[in-house]
Image: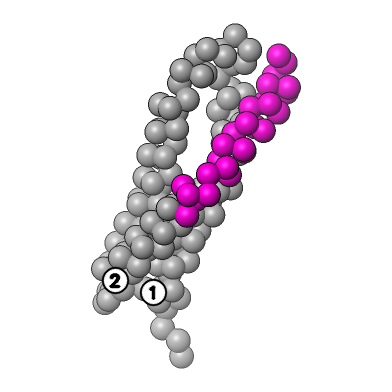
């Protein structure tokens, strides 16, 4: 396959896989909302700028680690398939298709997490 054709086929497959399972989507949604609630409860009572910076750092690290762990687990599961299909496409089309297909969904969950924590912790600052 050519690189563009391989990218299109891999993107189509990755997009179907990432949106197919409604149960996994629901569990990720519940986990995101629940974890954001816990972070909001823990970091919601900030008194100083150091507390605020700490809460932003912890929420950022948490959001990135969730996406990283999910990506690593996916690569482990798909390794036999990729190894078997290696003669049809290289690693660049595979990785690019995964990023393009799963990136928006990961961004959605990270954004949802950030919005919930932002609102609970009142990170907009003092009004008045």
Magenta region, main secondary structure: helix
> Are discs 1 and 2 less than 8 Å apart at CB?
yes
Q: Magenta stretch: give its range.
A: 1-26
Q: Position of residue 76 (x, y in %)?
A: 40, 26
Please identify the quarter of the rendering in which residue 123 is found.
bottom left
* Looking at the image, residue 54 lies above or below residue 95: below
Residue 7 falls within the magenta-colored stretch:
yes
Query: Disc 1 marks which residue?
Result: 120
* Among the two numbered marks 1 and 2 on one chain, the one whose residue lies closer to the N terminus: 2
Q: Secondary structure at mark 2?
A: helix
Q: Position of residue 23 (x, y in %)?
A: 48, 49
Q: Is residue 101 left or right of residue 118?
A: right
* Looking at the image, residue 14 lies above or below residue 82: below
Q: Position of residue 37 (x, y in %)?
A: 35, 67
The answer to whether residue 26 is seen in the rendering is yes
Q: Is residue 79 left or right of residue 88?
A: left
Q: Is residue 50 left or right of residue 78?
A: left
Q: Exactly how many numbered labels are in the figure?
A: 2
Query: Disc 2 marks which residue?
Result: 41
Name the residue at 26% across, 68% down: 42
Name the residue at 34% across, 60% down: 35
48, 121: nearer the viewer? 121
Q: Secondary structure at mark 1?
A: helix
105, 62: nearer the viewer? 105
The extreme top residue here reads 87
68, 58: nearer the viewer? 68
Q: How far apart are the alpha carbons under marks 1 and 2? A: 8 Å
Q: Quadrant of the N terminus?
A: top right
Q: Which mark is residue 46?
A: none
The answer to whether residue 110 is seen in the rendering is no
Circle 1: is it few (<14), some (14-19), or many (20+) Cα within 10 Å?
A: some
Circle 2: is it few (<14), some (14-19), or many (20+) Cα within 10 Å?
A: few
């Amino acid at each position: 396959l050519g690189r563009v054709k391989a990218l299109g086929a891999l993107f189509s497959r990755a997009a179907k896989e990432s949106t197919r399972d409604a149960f996994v989507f629901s569990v990720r949604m519940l986990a995101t909302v629940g974890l954001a609630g816990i972070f909001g409860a823990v970091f919601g009572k900030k008194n100083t700028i150091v507390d605020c910076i700490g809460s932003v750092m912890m929420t950022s690290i948490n959001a990135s680690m969730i996406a990283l762990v999910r990506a690593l687990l996916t690569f482990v599961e798909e390794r036999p398939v990729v190894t078997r299909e290696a003669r049809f496409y290289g690693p660049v089309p595979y990785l690019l298709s995964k990023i393009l297909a799963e990136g928006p969904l990961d961004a959605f969950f990270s954004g949802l997490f950030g919005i919930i924590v932002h609102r609970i912790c009142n990170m907009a600052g003092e009004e008045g």
